[in-house]
Image (cartoon, grey):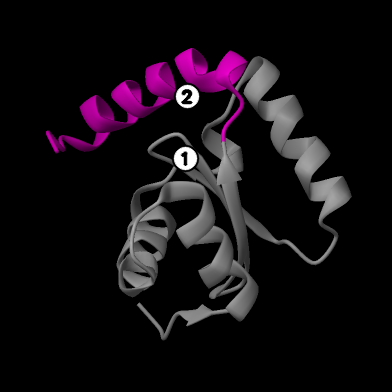
Amino acid sequence: MSNLYITDHSERRFKERTGLPKRLVTAKAREALERGITHAETTGQLRRYYDKLYAEHRTANNIRTYHNYVYIFYYDALITMFPLPQSLRKTAIKIWRKKQIDTGNTD
């Protein structure tokens, strides 16, 4: 994978919203980019939520959901991240489980 760029804004938001140290932002963003739920994998309400995010964040061209957080990327640059709404978490978990079964991953 190419270099991952972390904006100052996304670094601050990561610390503020997860409570984890800033030094982990690159690792978590890389995991989200590699393993997160993509737009193509979404269905129903989660897909409509992604569509809304694309419309709101016009520079975003890559949105991923990973461990109940939404990561907004512009190519390989993390722009921001925030918690996935509670109402969409069950859908995301179902998609995540299906993705793990389809790829043979157990992590």
Q: Which residue is mark 1?
A: 37
Whether the magenta-drawn stretch holds residue 37 is answered as no
Mark 2 neighbour density, 10 Å: few (under 14) some (14–19) many (20 or more): many
Which numbered circle lies on residue 90?
none
Overall secondary structure of the magenta stretch?
Answer: helix
* Residue where numbered disc 2 is placed: 92
Q: Is residue 83 above or below residue 60?
A: above
Where 75 falls versus 42 (above or below)? Answer: below
Left or right, 34 with respect to 10, comes to left
Residue at 66% x, 16% y is 44
Against 25, is 20 above or below?
Answer: above
Mark 2 or mark 1: which comes first in sequence?
1
Determine whether, in the image, residue 64 is placed left or right of residue 1.
Answer: right
Label 1 crowd (10 A; few <14 / some 14-19 / many >=20): many
Residue 83, compared with residue 15, is above or below; it is: above
Tell me the quarter of the image containing the N terminus. bottom left
Amino acid carrying mark 2 in the image: Ala
Q: How many marks?
A: 2
Image location of residue 35, percent across then percent down = 34, 49
For residue 44, side relative to residue 88 (left or right): right
Question: Where residue 55 sits: x, y (%)?
Answer: 87, 47
Asked if residue 72 can be seen in this view, the reply is no
Residue 82 x, y percent position in the rendering: 59, 46
Q: Where is residue 29 drawn, in percent x and y?
A: 41, 63
**What range of the chain is rendered magenta?**
84-107
Quadrant that contains the C terminus: top left
Q: Could you tell me the amino acid type at mark 1?
A: Ile
Asked if residue 91 lies in the magenta stretch, the reply is: yes
Kindly identify the residue that appears in the image at 79 percent across and 48 percent down: 54
Cβ atoms under marks 2 and 1 closer than 8 Å: yes
> Is residue 12 among what the camera can see?
yes
